Each structure stands twice: as C-alpha cells, then as structure tokens.
Image (spheres, rainbow, N blue to C red):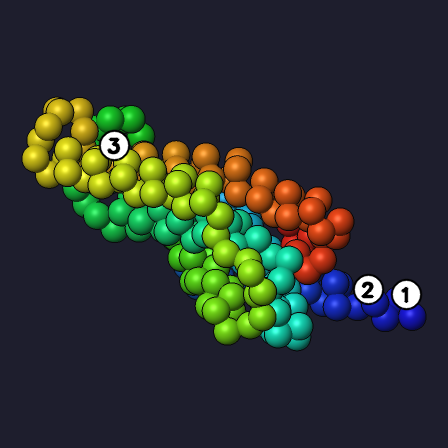
Amino acid sequence: MEKDSKKPVIFTVIGIFVFSVLLRLVTGPNAVLPSPWNYISQYVGWLYFCAWSISFYPQIFLNYTRKSVVGLSFDFLAYNLVAFSCYTVYNFSLLYVPEIRQEYQEMYHQHVPVVVNDLFFSAHAMLVTSFTIFQCFIYERKEQRVSKVAISILCSIFLLILLCILGTAFHVVSWLTPLIILIVFSNIKLVISFIKYIPQLMLNCRRKSTYPFYVRAEVA
C-alpha cells in the first residue's frame, strides 16, 4: 500500500524532468551565457518552471473535489494575483520592449537577466491564481472574504503604481523612468512574497487545522 502511494509522486517527478528537457529542446539554449552554461541554465530554468507550476494544481483539484474553498485564505489569493501580475508585466517588458531593454543595459551595463521561462512561469501562475479565485465565487465559502487589512495594503500598492505611472507620463521627476516603474513592480512581488502566507497561517491557527490549504505544494 505504501509503495502504491509513492507511485504518483515518482511519476510526477519523472514527468517534470522529461517535460523540462522537451521545453529546453524547443526553446534552445540561453543566448547570453557561454557553453555549456547556456544549456544548463536553460534546463534548470525550465525545471524550475515545471516544478513550481505543477504545485498550483493540487489546490485547484482539492477545491473541485470538495466543492468548497472554506479554509483557504482569500487574502493569500489576492496577494498572489497582484504579485504574479506585477511579475508578469516586469518579465514581459524586459523581454520584449526594446526601449526597456536598452534602458536596462545602459543603467546596469549588462545583459537583461530575464529569460522566456521566467515569463512563462509568472504568466502561468497569474492565470492559475485567477482560476483559483474564480473557484471562490462558485464554491462554498461561507462568510469568508478578503480582509480590510489586505484591501488596504492592495489599495496602497495600486496607488503607488498609479503615482509612478503618472509621474513618468508627466515627467514629474527625471529619475522616474519606465524601467524604474518595473523595478517597483519587481519589489512589490518581493514584498508580497514575504507577507502573503501570514493570512493563511492566521486562518490555520484560528481553525486549528491546515486543511484544506495544500501544504505539500508549499513545502515542495
């Protein structure tokens, strides 16, 4: 029985490694690094993408089987959506906006460190988080909602972004450029990564249970 319970984990790990190889073959090596590090870097990047991406799905499946999201922190999901949205904008801009890439190279005197698997990861995480939030609207949730604290923090973030965009558009200060706004986006993602689990931890303490938050995915 114990051996059978390990089979899905083994197949998942094998699948992650195989799929990572296929993605690496399709996208090619890292164009910046010398050989063999260009191949190693690209493979590790896709391995990271596969491992993290698959970790989102057990929670979705658990919500589906329970037809309930009771016990899953809505603050956690709201933080995640904002964080991954900022991260997606950051990655896309550094990858595909020539003006941003040029500004980055002029500022740091090095190649842009963002690669395509970074964009794939952030965009996929944003979409999967959006779907999980959709589940919160269609499944049982009792009285759960996004807290006033989370709403205040997120509104402050949106206000900061708006002020940065307006400051750039109207040239309020010379140093506030599109690249600086993207750096703000990346720092928003970083800060949220530090605080996003706190609401779920507090909810677990109140309920005296980690269920139905899929802890294995976070540990992995």
Tell me the CA gap for discs 1 and 3.
53 Å
Q: Which element type, helix, strand or loop, lies under badge 1?
A: helix
Residue annotated with mark 3: 180
Asked where in the image residue 158 lies, by quadrant, the reply is: top left
Sequence-wise, which precedes: disc 1 or disc 3?
1
Q: In the image, what residue occupies the spot 10% across and 38% down?
A: 169
Residue annotated with mark 2: 6
Sequence-wise, which precedes: disc 3 or disc 2?
2
* Mark 2 Cα shell of 10 Å, populated few (<14), some (14-19), many (≥20): few
Q: Give residue 128's mark.
A: none
Report the side of 164 relative to 204 (left or right). Answer: left
Q: In the image, what residue occupies the spot 45% across and 34% down?
A: 191
Where residue 100 appears, as percent x and y from the top left, is 21, 40
Residue toward you, 199 or 49: 199
* Mark 3 Cα shell of 10 Å, populated few (<14), some (14-19), many (≥20): some
Residue toward you, 219 or 36: 219
Residue annotated with mark 1: 2
Asked where in the image residue 66 lies, by quadrant, the reply is: bottom right
Report the side of 168 relative to 81 (left or right). Answer: left
Where residue 173 appears, as percent x and y from the top left, is 13, 25
Report the side of 186 relative to 14 (left or right). Answer: left
Of tags 3 and 2, the one toward the viewer is 3
Do callouts 1 and 2 mark residues in contact (Cβ within 8 Å)? Answer: yes
